[in-house]
């Protein structure tokens, strides 16, 4: 048996990959909704944040188990190297995404509590700006997930599946 972390006898990496591939883009879509309407931020903000947080936590776990799997299989070829190099970029962007989402929720709550006319306008503008930045960061993270996943899928399936 391979000397890697397993879940029910299967290497953990291909299983954990799905947490990243599903949760981060799902959180990005949720962030677009949160940015679009303050009422959606109030209703969906915390669940979207929790989804993003779990996706973020899955990133280092996925890269660590990927390293274990690569070592257990005796290293990888050039396609695995491309996948690994791309994957190194995701964590910092995911951290920024989750931080901006949290800022959006906190600033939005502050905007909801403000009462003075000038204060409301400023607080609303700051919360909206944070929401737009969080939504953009979510789109960047989604693009990175697709870019990394494409390299991983190519490394695994090239030569196995043909276009015939």
Image (cartoon, helix red, strand yellow):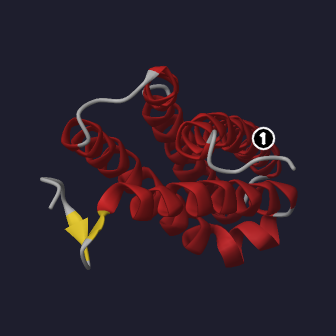
Secondary structure at numbered mark 1: helix
Seen at 45% across and 30% down, the residue is 80
Q: Is residue 118 left or right of residue 12?
A: right
Seen at 59% across and 50% down, the residue is 101
**Residue 147 % position (x, y):** 66, 34
Q: Can you say which quadrant of the picture contains the N terminus?
A: bottom left
Can residue 114 be spotted in the picture? no
**Residue 19 % position (x, y):** 49, 63
Q: Is residue 107 left or right of residue 99?
A: right
Seen at 29% across and 38% down, the residue is 70
- Which residue carries the number 1 mark? 132
Q: Is residue 51 above or below residue 82?
A: below
Dividing the picture into quadrants, the one containing residue 92 is top left
Q: Is residue 154 left or right of residue 18?
A: right
Seen at 69% across and 53% down, the residue is 28
Q: Is residue 82 above or below residue 94?
A: above
């Amino acid at each position: 048996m391979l000397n890697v972390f397993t879940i029910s006898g299967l290497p953990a990496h291909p299983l954990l990959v799905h947490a990243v591939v599903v949760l981060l883009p799902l959180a990005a879509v949720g962030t677009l909704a949160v940015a679009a309407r303050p009422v959606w931020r109030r209703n969906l903000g915390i669940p979207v944040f929790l989804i993003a947080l779990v996706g973020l936590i899955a990133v280092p776990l996925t890269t660590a188990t990927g390293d274990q799997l690569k070592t257990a299989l005796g290293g990888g070829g050039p396609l695995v190297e491309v996948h690994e190099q791309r994957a190194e970029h995701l964590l910092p962007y995911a951290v920024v995404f989750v931080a901006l989402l949290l800022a959006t929720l906190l600033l939005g709550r502050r905007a909801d509590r403000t009462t003075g006319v000038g204060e409301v306008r400023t607080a609303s503008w700051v919360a909206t700006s944070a929401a737009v930045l969080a939504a953009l960061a979510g789109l960047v993270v989604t693009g990175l997930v697709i870019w990394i996943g494409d390299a991983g899928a190519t490394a695994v399936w090239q030569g196995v599946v043909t276009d015939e």
